[in-house]
Image: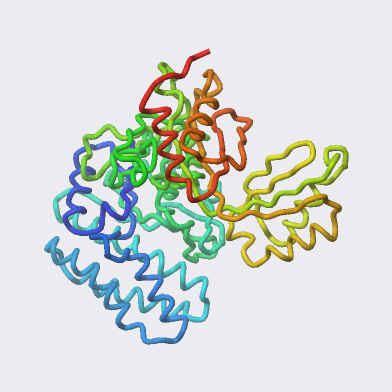
Amino acid sequence: MKVSKFGGSSVANSEQIKKVLNIINSDDERKIVVLSAPGKRFKEDIKTTDLLIRLYDKVINNLDYSNKLRQIIERYEEIVTELEMDDAILKEIKDNLLYLIDVYKNQPERLLDALKSCGENFNAKIIAQYNNQLGYPTRYLSPKEAGIIVTDEPGNAMILESSYEKIYQLREYDETLIIPGFFGYSENDDIVTFPRGGSDITGAILARGIKASLYENFTDVSGIFRANPTVVSQPEVIPEITYREMRELSYAGFGVFHDEALEPLYKDRIPVVIKNTNRPHDKGTFIVSEREISNLSHIVSGVSCDKGFTIINVKKYLMNREVGFTRKVLSILEEENISIEHIPSGIDNLSIIMRSAQIKGKEERVLNKIREEIEVDELTIDYDLAILMIVGEGMNKAIGTAAGATKALSKNKVNLNMINQGSSEISMMFGIDEQYSDIAVQAIYNEYFAKETTQII
């Protein structure tokens, strides 16, 4: 039994929905389907979820929201009309939105989650009804009916372990099940959403819950590229990648698959495949627990680069002999509620890397606290840092992987602010100036994928 999730671009309009149902109905193993809210129909379009957030803003600020409500109804009206469906469902959609606004208007967090969930929920109801109309036995299930009970953290829900027993019972249904993604229900029966992109998480939870043979994640690309296609022209598609590699690449900017969605899957080693709704026969990219390193071209899986980091540099002679020095520095950041990304260090220096948004507006206060509470020789802060990640399970078995990377960056005049290799030995991380991020990605791609010079140990 497979779980198949379709992203926003896959269900953006009636034409795409027909493609989705052709895929679902062509394979009897596709018994559980997770749907996103309608995405962009064209480049300048607005996603349905964003329309719902704008509706929330109007409501919460006591402004006239009738125009935003109409825009949302029109998105679904277009789909219903083009699919030649009964338009009674449109009244149900409008009534549901007005009901949620009335019930939660004095509870902002609850209202936001309730409205955001509507994009997926309405779409699932429409598509389930249409597939029945086509003659395929299909049942809509709300996340509550499916057993997705989550923690009560608006916008940041997590599945309760006790939910999986009920989710397993979904295997007993004969019909194809259509379940909206992105949200669950708390034990108090409130709607609670996952982080943005959370339909991936819903699909992963269901795949683990029913012990699926495969979790299919359909999007608008034929797999995961080895590098950002907006930076590198026509990069290769990765045929197979491990959970660990995917996690590392997602951290540094790969956005095809929500990285938090890996967590429910790797424990039970459920494979994932990223496929293209518009080209369903393309093989796609498989995410697996382990992969075979059989030839030179498979040493490095991909390269990614993420911007928006800040680094605090601390220097003190004989730092390594001072017990508790690092703890004292980190406690100051903890007091300011600043989370840390990386802490490369030497015997007399310490670098603390964080997302720039974490420290924005707090820089002067943090630096002053370090100066006042800890005796240091030098203290500086640098902005506009990018993190370049080179990821591959085979790197710890290869000669010259790091040398090739530094040589390629040097040749392209990319200065390195920091180098770090994780203890897992499946990734190398470089800190570079943001302005060189695209140049660096292209240089690394050319080094590892345009030629094969790595020697296996």
Residue 13: % across, % down: 21, 59
Q: Residue 203 versus residue 253: which sits nearer the camera?
A: 253
Q: Residue at x 30, y 44 (%)?
A: 218
Q: Residue 191 versus residue 170: which sits nearer the camera?
A: 191
Q: How many marks?
A: 0
Which quadrant of the rendered structure holds the N terminus?
A: top left
Q: Residue 172 versus residue 340: which sits nearer the camera?
A: 340
Give the quadrant of residue 277.
Answer: top left
Q: Residue at x 55, y 54 (%)?
A: 384
Is 264 above or below relative to 18?
above
Q: Residue at x 78, y 46 (%)?
A: 315
Residue sitting farthest toward the top: 457
Residue 408: % across, % down: 47, 31
Residue 199: % across, % down: 40, 52
* Residue 368 falls left or right of residue 302: right
Residue 268 in view here: no
Is 239 above or below relative to 177?
above
* Residue 367 falls left or right of residue 159: right
Color scheme of the displayed model? rainbow
Is 47 above or below relative to 286?
below
Q: Residue at x 47, y 77 (%)?
A: 104
Residue 105: % across, % down: 47, 80
* Residue 324 falls left or right of residue 28: right
Residue 107 in view here: yes
Q: Residue 213 versus residue 133: which sits nearer the camera?
A: 213
* Residue 15 falls left or right of residue 422: left
